[in-house]
Amino acid sequence: MSSELDGFRIGECIHSGAMGRIFRVTGRDPGVPMIMKVPRVGPGESAENLISFETEAMILPALSGPHVPRFVAAGDLARTPYIVTEWIEGESLEQVLKRGPLPVPEIVRIGAALADAVHTLHLQDAVHLDLKPDNVILKADGDVALIDFGLTYHAHFPDLLAEEQRFAAGSAPYISPEQVLGIRSDPRSDIFSLGAVLYELATGELPFGAPATMAGLHDRLWLDPLPPRVRSRDVPPWLQEIILRCLEPRAEDRYQSAAHVAFDLRNPDQVALTARAVKSRRTGVFGQARRWWRTRGERARPLRMPKAQVGTTPVIMVAVDTTHPDDERQPALQRTTAQVLSLSPEFRLICVSVIRGGPGAEGSSDAGSPSGIYLDHLVRLRHWVEPLRLPVRRLSLHVIESANPENTLLEFARRNHVDLIVLGAPNPAQLGLAWWRSVASGVTANARCSVHVVRVPERATGRQDATP
Amino acid sequence: MRQLIIALLSDVHGNLEALDACLKHAGASGAGRYAFLGDLVGYGADPQAVVDTVARFAAEGAVVVKGNHDEAVEKTPSYMNESVRTVIDWTRETLSDEGKVFLSSLPLCIREGPICFVHASAASPKRWYYIDSPAAAQRSIDAAQTAYTFSGHVHDQELYFQAAPGKTKVFRPVRGSPVPIGRHRRWLALVGSVGQPRDRNPEAAYAQFDTERERITFHRVPYDHLAAARKIRQAGLPASIAYRVEHGI
């Protein structure tokens, strides 16, 4: 290969594998370090290899954000196939794993960042389909970037790989049961792979080993993995719950959104524990036989846009003023919240109360200690949401002390991928609530998601004044 | 204006409101060439105005091929149902002689470099086969022998592509989202219907092909479909046809 191609100066070869080679390149300065991927072409090379290269060249330019490498340029596929992208500085998760299982706080940090990255990909109508430690880069800033989009599905482009790949569709230890069946358009497949990666982070083992045959791959359609806590007692029940829920053989039994996985990892005390959390062995022979029987009829379902799937699984955050539980706007806020929730079957509701921080800020509480105040508000919050009669796994409650409620709500919403914030409008009649006025307007102005501001219909006080 | 972007318009079916809306949309988004893929008339209440418009574009170098409804104006075929016959007979009476000559002089198929323009299937265009399966698309692609085949006849927007030699697959495009279609593969695009979409969305449908960047974009364009339907009723044409335009069915 010549040392220059289309204005790129080719440097050191940093990877040489079955799929192709990767070089460091410079020139045509986009302001970031760059690499050039060159596929293996020619007689004896597999056609799948080239199709997967073509897929990546088609999809990468359509992706953006901090969790994917920036696309720089692509060569003509028929003459000089190459892709130039940003080189993401960092350590691959594969390298991290070589040092053995990670402590729980590290699993949570990396797992939640990985779920963030997966969620933002799904929001762009793409499904990665080849999530594995090799393809996950831990950046210095704590974020995670995904690489290698050669098997990715994007709803806006023809799927060149459909039916093309059999055994090669993804990496055997991590791929979902539906990928084994040839379904390539379900974002929940990435959630399964995310579960497999979490399992490996927690136990140092692969949940299904590394099957080398098609029959071995089919096992995961009905076989569940050995519970992580059996392999390592360090895994807390809530983490086992999260991991096994991701690894459910049926996509509808898993988390329906990566944002929900990220949320649970960051809020262990809010994870709704089920039988999964305490499971100490695999499902019995009869349970497996039942699942095996059920999977016999499985076949590809109609395509659905990943974004549409994510759209049916919104994270909704309601800001509740527990300092004024008797405020006349509370029932209106409850009613609106109930209406919003009734629109989507797979919602997640986060109830947040921001209370003023610092000692002495809250004088009305019976308990004088800060934790007493916190508990007092948590009880009020629970009381507030109780009439909505929501299943525990759809709900989480948070009391946060802060001197700046606006920023606290905004930051909390951003970090937890909130799709809609519901909060009360300031009431001009109540001067005592002037503090909330700035919050509602500030949140509306600065939120990255939709905001639903609830108002109590104004009573016809003006007309009363007018009557003699 | 770039010569490099071709607006692909098919199945106008005498719907002037829809045609005007699509031409305006195409002009505003940089189309420099126009290709009309057949069925200028039939169903709609403005065959004369539509034919006049298209003839004007043809004089400026637009590609125009014949559709089965255009052919039916010459001689009503036996396969058409009652309400369609009614419209065809009415169209024959309404159209000027020049209009009828224009329609009957249209070719069935035009090949231009890497592109084949044809109303139905390039595999015997005269038989008006529907491209309703990957196998039917494959036959048309094989007969066209070009990288691109652009067609109408089927009123849906679909993109067929050769995933591997001998293996043709179908993709449902997302409106407004450009799809790279490199000429190292063979592609068959059904561009949708300008004047009578049938996917329960009354918006006019057409596509644009960027010849330089090798990308196709499928568009939907809202237009005054209620006015178009009203004209069909006022012309005394079957109410069922007006209803279809109103509801996009």
Image: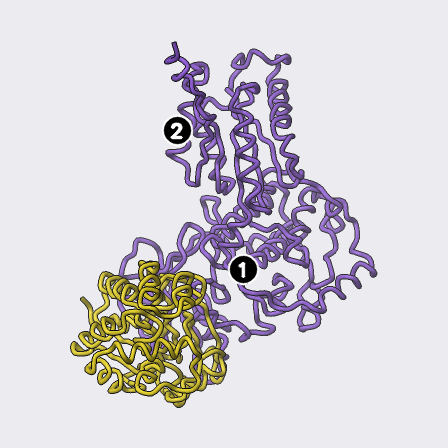
Q: Is residue B10 visible?
A: yes
Three-letter code, disc 2 = Ser
Which residue bears the numbered disc 2?
A441
Q: Earlier in the sequence, mark 2 or mark 1?
A: 1
- Report helix, strand or loop for mark 1: helix
- Which of the 4 quarters of the picture holds residue B184? bottom left
> Which chain wears yellow?
B
**Image coords of residue A464 (percent x, y):** 41, 14
Query: Please, what secondary structure does the residue beneath circle 2 have?
Result: helix
Q: Residue at x 44, y 79 (%)?
A: B81
The amino acid type, in three-letter code, at marker 1 is: Asp
Position of residue A373 relative to residue B227, above or below, is above
- In this view, A238 is above or below A438: below
> Tell me, what colour scheme is on the image?
by chain
Observer-side mark, 2 or 1, equals: 2
Q: Is residue B146 left or right of residue A320?
A: left
Q: Residue at x 50, y 54 (%)?
A: A308
Residue topped by disc 1: A134
Is residue A13 in sight in this rendering? no
Q: Give residue B108's position: percent from left, percent from top.
A: 31, 86
